């Protein structure tokens, strides 16, 4: 996909989104909200994809579960990929299902070598079924877990190396996790292999009502924080332009408000491209 900035699509914005003249605009959806044979949502997606590139960002494959991805869910995802031909397909480095029980969250796990083997297998299963590489997103974390054998950046880099998958870097997740667990978000982003990054997400977060800034929550319900913008600019400066998505899943504002954030990300991408074109001075 061309490294421009896009928006998470919301049905209430359908007419405005379709009519937007923004150059390079693309849209991303959670496929689980569109896994239907007919009805208004698939019709919206058909109309959008005729005008704009699409990306599918899954929340239901449960890649980190100690089990293969659900075969029925994977088949439905493949049907969507075949039907809509998205530019990118992504999932989360987390688990949410086990033995028929589904949890409405993206849950963490100890980053052991055994977990790496399991997730490598699950990513291979998904990529074989879809006949294309996927992107895997870094999680947002809230409490420390015991038993880690690899850092998150080591885990992601090894997962990408062994499966050929790409990485979806959610910069807000890095900021939230760094705040909550006490690590340097800049060092984290500097350790990510540049060539593996296929997409970037930017979103908002909120402070916990009881603990305040000591615990940040990845709500996707607020404007992008200035600290996240600064990390994004640093990351783009190091790795170059990448497709960048503005995520908003709660407290949805008017389309124009989201488009303004999208335009800010687009300006960062343009500035990086312009800098790379400048002649070197000796």
Image (tube, grey):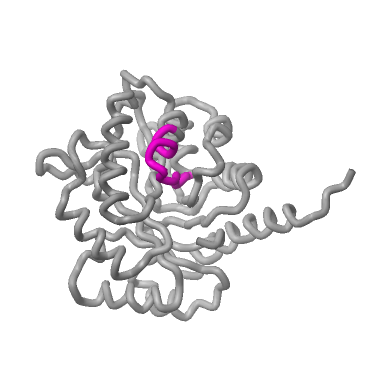
Q: Is residue 124 magenta?
A: no
**Is residue 160 found left or right of 186 in the rendered image?**
left
Can residue 212 be seen here? The reply is no
Q: Quadrant of the C terminus?
A: top right
Residue stretch rendered in magenta on the structure: 158-170
Can residue 211 be seen here? The reply is yes
In this view of the protein, which residue sits in the foreground, 2 or 245?
2
- Rendered image quadrant of residue 139: top left
Q: Could you say where residue 57 lies in the image, as x and y percent from the top left?
A: 35, 55
Q: Could you say where residue 48 lies in the image, as x and y percent from the top left?
A: 39, 75
> Which residue lies at the image location 31% right of the left edge and 63% below the top edge?
81
- Rendered image quadrant of residue 38: bottom left
Q: Is residue 163 magenta?
A: yes
Q: Could you say where residue 270 lies in the image, as x and y percent from the top left?
A: 66, 60
- Rendered image quadrant of residue 149: top left
Q: Could you say where residue 101 lies in the image, as x and y percent from the top left?
A: 12, 42
> Which residue lies at the image location 54% right of the left edge and 62% below the top edge?
2
Q: Is residue 136 above or below residue 78?
A: above
Q: How many marks?
A: 0
Question: Which residue lies most toward the right here?
Answer: 282
> Which residue lies at the image location 47% right of the left edge and 44% below the top edge?
169
> Which residue lies at the image location 33% right of the left edge and 71% below the top edge?
11
In this view of the protein, which residue sits in the foreground, 179 or 8?
8
In this view of the protein, which residue sits in the foreground, 235 or 227?
235
In this view of the protein, which residue sits in the foreground, 156 or 28?
156
**Is residue 215 found left or right of 175 in the rendered image?**
left
**Is residue 6 found left or right of 74 in the rendered image?**
right
């Amino acid at each position: 996909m061309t490294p421009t900035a896009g928006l998470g699509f919301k049905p209430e914005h359908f007419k405005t989104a379709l009519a937007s003249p923004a150059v390079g605009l693309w849209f991303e959806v959670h496929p689980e909200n569109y896994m239907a044979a007919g009805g208004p949502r698939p019709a919206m997606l058909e109309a959008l994809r005729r005008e704009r590139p699409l990306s599918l960002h899954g929340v239901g494959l449960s890649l980190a579960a100690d089990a293969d991805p659900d075969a029925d869910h994977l088949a439905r995802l493949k049907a969507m990929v075949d039907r809509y031909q998205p530019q990118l397909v992504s999932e989360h480095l987390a688990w949410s299902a086990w033995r028929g029980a589904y949890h409405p969250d993206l849950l963490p796990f100890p980053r052991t070598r055994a977990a790496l083997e399991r997730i490598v297998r699950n990513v291979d299963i998904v990529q074989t079924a879809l006949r294309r590489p996927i992107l895997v997103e870094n999680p947002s974390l809230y409490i420390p877990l015991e038993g880690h054998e690899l850092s998150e950046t080591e885990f992601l880099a090894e997962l990408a190396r062994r499966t050929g998958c790409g990485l979806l870097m959610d910069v807000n997740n890095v900021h939230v996790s760094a705040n909550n667990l006490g690590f340097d978000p800049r060092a984290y982003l500097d350790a990510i292999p540049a060539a593996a990054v296929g997409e970037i997400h930017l979103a908002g977060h909120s402070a916990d009502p009881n603990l305040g800034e000591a615990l940040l929550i990845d709500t996707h319900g607020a404007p992008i924080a200035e600290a996240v913008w600064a990390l994004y600019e640093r990351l783009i400066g190091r790795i170059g332009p990448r497709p960048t998505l503005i995520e908003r899943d709660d407290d949805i504002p008017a389309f124009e408000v989201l488009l303004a954030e999208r335009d800010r990300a687009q300006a960062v991408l343009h500035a990086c491209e312009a800098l790379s074109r400048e002649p070197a001075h000796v």
